[in-house]
Image (tube, helix red, strand yellow):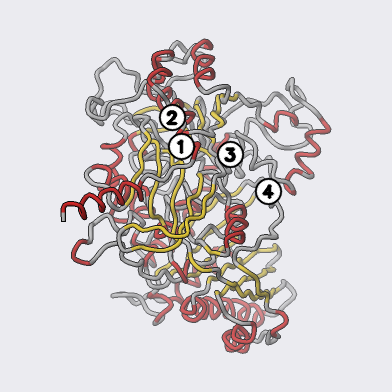
Amino acid sequence: MYLSKISLLLFIIHARARTFPFETTRLSEEDIQTFPAASFGDLDTAPAWDSWDGVTPTCRAWPGTNDWPADAEWAQLNATLGGALLRPVPVAAACHVDDVHYNETTCRWLVEESGQTHAWLDDPLSTLTQWPQGGTCRLALNTPGECTRGGYPEYVVNATTVKHIQAAVNFARNKNVRLVIKNTGHDFAGRAMGAGSLSIWVHNIKDFEFIPEYTVGLYKGMAVQVGAGLESWEHRKLMAKHNISVVTPEYKTVGAVGGWISVAGHGWLTSKFGLGADQVLAINVVTADGRFRMIDMNSEGLEEELWWALRGGGPSTFGVITSVILRAYPAVTLTRANMAFSVSSSDPPSTHAAFWNAISSYYLFCTNTITSNGGYCHDYIYPLGNNSFNFSTQLTLPDLSQAQTVNLLNPMYKQLGQPLPEASSIQIFPYADANLATPPSLLRETRYRSRIFPGYLFRNNSGVNTEIGWEEVFASVRRAVEEGGYTFHGVGYAVPTPAPVRPEAEARWSDAGAVNIAWRWPVVLLGSLVEEDPIGTVLSVAEARARDERARKYVGVWQDLMPGVGAYLNEGDPMEEEWEWRFYGGDMRRLAGVKRNWDPWGVFWAPTTPGSSEWYVATEYPGAQNGRLCRKRSDEPGPSGIR
């Protein structure tokens, strides 16, 4: 019995101790002796979360002021990092005619051709949505004036080892510098930006390992370990090599871990295998004290809290994830059908009515039939101007033949009056398609507002304890597109119950992770209103506020019809008035407690994440990150309306 217990303990340690080579390169005591500003923090002696001693600054250090680290300190940090500290010039500076970096040829390539390359994803500063930067470095031909950094970080650590991340976290904490985390820049809310900040750029951590047999708790099967910078398309190529499938983001260039699993994580395989957060078997992470930790379902005490919070409790707020171990499955084949139809201003009212009725019927078919067969719906309703509209959808189903897919879809096509698909028109391909070319990176000026439409709307067309049903809700969607001029983006899926990770009698509160319960409705339609401006568009403060207020009017109708429903953080409004409930459900109090326990200094900050309401960005531009980050005190609440 004694030997059995020792064997079990050794096995648990072995299961939890998987590291990539880059994770074994860590900050040493010798490094700290040479550069004390990189010293580790102590959670036990950290100041209380809500304390203020009357001396400690309430704002983060700011370039050009006395509290900003001297050039010599930045040079010492760079030496500790082995040269990994960057101070990049914003790419769009090439377009500002009065800037020293102006280059007409480069600017024209950026404006006209860069979107067809991977360039923006590989840039240490840029995010694919530019408006949180503040509009001070515009991508447009012959832009007057100079480019200024605005919301872009001052310095970037090109992290390729755990040591790089630890040194950056410690330096930022010890020197009171704002810290942000960035991978690909798929960020529509400004979480990867921050004026006067040091950015940890994990984009080049591309490590991957296939684990033929991994055991933890009740799980025994294939797994993969994935580095923080791996993109979904890169992940799928590696799956093909090993003839496996892993739940990853649908969009090719989204990071395969990090912010995706820290919210929930959905994609083509969600209805078959579950959310991205449900796939996690172990996480390696650097926390706010600078320590490297390996956690999993066997973690206890405060580490169990962290294990729970990292799986769905919010990105860029509890630590810097370096790698994750995920469940792997036998290779899956996907079958896909596309459908599109339009209506124009020249069509009679009866045709317009039929157009909208067809879309409404499609959503009912998607949520009742496609998702129950393990499928995933991805669609858009586009306003084309002049009372013309287009609808398009991509229906993806796992492990069905072309003939089976045709039989499944025929009732919908007949109901919608669409030509019946032939088997030859149905695409069939491996989920892990190894022939993916390097995807493009389209720069955008996108603003999202979202809601998670609950499954009861679609199952019986009536609300729970209410008279509201899908017809009323869809009428509000139609008004938002037809009257408001917004694009509506819908994603339909059904999340299966996660497989238990331990025997029922031993189940813990932390097993399911911190994913907002709204994601776990039996059927979900994730709906977003989308605004898209031409690149380089800069709105005034008044225009931006008016725009937010207008959009909020349409989202407010959803709120009235479906009180208490959730929203998708990664396609959410950073100025969402009830963001705690919308993005995190009833778990915000517990998540705030985990934040206090693990980051009493507030090292990690990003808008609409646990603990973020204790701080504000000193800018008048709604949602932008082009101001100083300051802490709220009871006697200094911060500017009204700014989060």
Residue 18 in the image: state x and y as whole percent.
Answer: 41, 45
Q: Residue at x 46, y 37 (%)?
A: 23
Q: Secondary structure at mark 2?
A: loop
Are the residues at dot 2 and dot 1 in contact (C-beta closer than 8 Å)?
yes
Structural distance between the alpha carbons of marks 3 and 4: 20 Å
Q: Give residue 134's quadrant in the image.
A: top right
Q: CA–CA distance between discs 2 and 1?
A: 7 Å
Gap in angstroms between the C-alphas marked 2 and 3: 17 Å
User: Quick one: 10 or 87, which is closer to the camera?
Assistant: 10
Is disc 4 placed on a helix, strand or loop? loop
To which residue does mark 4 refer? 442
| Residue wearing tag 1 | 23
* Three-letter code, disc 3: Asn
Of circles 4 and 1, which is in front? 1
Classify 24 as above or below 458. above
* Amino acid at dot 1: Glu
**Res. 26 mark:** 2
The answer to which quarter of the image holds residue 632 is top left
Which residue is pictured at 61% across the width and 59% down the height?
Answer: 241
Regarding residue 35, the answer to whether it shows in the image is: yes
Q: Which residue is mark 3?
A: 204
Among the two numbered marks 3 and 4 on one chain, the one whose residue lies closer to the N terminus: 3
Q: At which x and y percent is residue 338?
A: 66, 74
Label 3 Cα crowd, 10 Å radius (few <14 / some 14-19 / many 20+): some
Q: Is residue 485 left or right of residue 324?
A: right
Q: Nearer the viewer, residue 580 or 558?
A: 580
Point out residue 178 in the picture as x, y percentages from the top left corner: 44, 27
Query: Which secondary structure, mark 3?
Result: loop
CA separation, marks 2 and 4? 36 Å
